[in-house]
Each structure stands twice: as C-alpha cells, then as structure tokens.
C-alpha cells in the first residue's frame, strides 16, 4: 500500500539511545544534498513551473499530490487528494523550497500491496525550485551509499537552502506528471 513516513530531528534523536547506534556522522560520511547559502537563492535551471502534480499510483491517472509555487515565500505549498496537505503540528499547509522527483522501477513485494523501489540503478528526475523545473539525473552506487543528484550534464546539483520533498515514482508515470 502507499505510505508516507514523516518525522523530525527530535523524534529521531529520542529513538537512538539504547539501540547501539552512533549519534555522530562517520568521518567519511557523504551528505545526501548539496545546499547553497541561504542568501544565495537561485531558481532551478529550466522551464517555468508554477504548478506541478504527480500521480503516485499506476491505477489512477488523477494527480494525488500537487505543488503550487508562491513568489512571496519562494516555496511550493503541497496538496493531496484535491486539498491542502496540512501540517498536523502547525495547522498550516506544508511548504517546501525544493521538490525532487525520482523515476525508477517500482515492483510488488507480495499480495498485500507492499512495493519496493529500485534505488540502486539510478535514473532521470526533476528538480523544482523558485518556480522552475529542471531535468536531473540521480544515482546510488550501492545499498549503503547516499543518493547523488546531478544536472543532465553531470554537474553536482546544488539545492536552495530549505525544506526538500522527495517523490519516488515508477518510470511509467513520467507521462502522467503535469506542470505549468
């Protein structure tokens, strides 16, 4: 079944003690994102994208998640199932600075609707920020390696500082993504 997992730094930190997990990054840890300085905001290098919607399921072509750009806040307000996606803590719509859309192979694991996403083969995707949409590539060398995001030319993708929402979609859904 479709699912979403949400947490925050406080909950993650509270879950670590007593589980034998380290609480600091290893010296050779690679960070999952490259962010520019907060005062150096730059829109994605691509086409205009004020509105973006993605269908998360192959059996429904109606978009189930949307993002509307707001020039004032330089963020995308997220919607789901035709209405705003509300933050349960603040009561406000969820707003993100960056949206990453990754296309890959998604396949069923069992007869209960559980699925798995193949994240070690790399693929195409989109980066949305600043009212623009840019085509990107993503890769992951192995199961324990971080995702690496690059431009179509192979340069490291630098994101704007802020919240980032990552959508992982089956490659077959690429034609059902809508943006304007």
Image: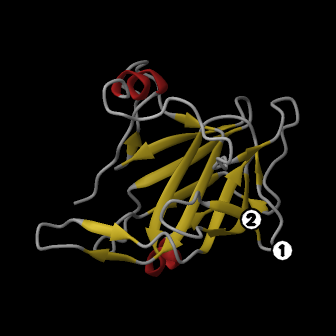
Structural crowding at the residue carrying mark 2, measured as other residues with C-alpha within 10 Å and reported as few (<14), some (14–19) or many (≥20): some
Q: Is residue 85 left or right of residue 69?
A: left
Residue 23 percent across, percent down from the top left: 50, 29
Residue 34 percent across, percent down from the top left: 74, 47
Residue 35 percent across, percent down from the top left: 76, 42
Which residue occupies 43% across, 78% down?
105
Contact? badges 2 and 1 (CB < 8 Å): yes
Q: Quadrant of residue 70?
A: top right
Q: Is residue 129 left or right of residue 92?
A: right
- Which residue is the site of mark 2? 150
- Judging depth in this view, the residue of 51 and 56 nearest the camera is 56
- Judging depth in this view, the residue of 55 and 38 nearest the camera is 38
Structural crowding at the residue carrying mark 1, measured as other residues with C-alpha within 10 Å and reported as few (<14), some (14–19) or many (≥20): few
- Judging depth in this view, the residue of 138 and 124 nearest the camera is 138
Q: CA distance from mark 2 to mark 1?
A: 8 Å
Residue 80 percent across, percent down from the top left: 39, 47
Which residue occupies 84% across, 34% down?
37
Which residue occupies 60% across, 56% down?
100
- Which residue is the site of mark 1? 153
- Dot 1 falls on a residue whose secondary structure is loop
Q: Quadrant of residue 13?
A: top left
Q: Quadrant of residue 14?
A: top left
């Amino acid at each position: 079944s479709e699912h979403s997992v949400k947490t925050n730094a406080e909950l993650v930190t509270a879950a670590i003690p007593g589980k034998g997990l380290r609480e600091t990054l290893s010296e050779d840890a690679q960070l999952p994102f490259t962010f520019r300085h907060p005062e150096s905001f730059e829109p994605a290098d691509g086409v205009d994208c004020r509105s973006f919607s993605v269908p998360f399921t192959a059996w429904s072509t109606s978009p189930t998640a949307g993002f509307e750009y707001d020039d004032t806040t330089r963020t995308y307000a997220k919607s789901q199932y035709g209405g705003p996606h509300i933050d349960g803590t603040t009561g406000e719509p969820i707003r993100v600075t960056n949206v990453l859309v990754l296309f890959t192979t998604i396949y069923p694991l069992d007869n209960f609707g559980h699925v798995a996403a193949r994240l070690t083969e790399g693929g195409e995707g989109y980066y949305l920020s600043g009212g623009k949409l840019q085509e990107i590539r993503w890769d992951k060398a192995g199961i324990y390696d971080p995702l690496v995001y690059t431009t179509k030319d192979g340069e490291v993708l630098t994101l704007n500082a802020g919240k980032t929402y990552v959508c992982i979609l089956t490659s077959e859904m690429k034609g059902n993504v809508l943006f304007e």
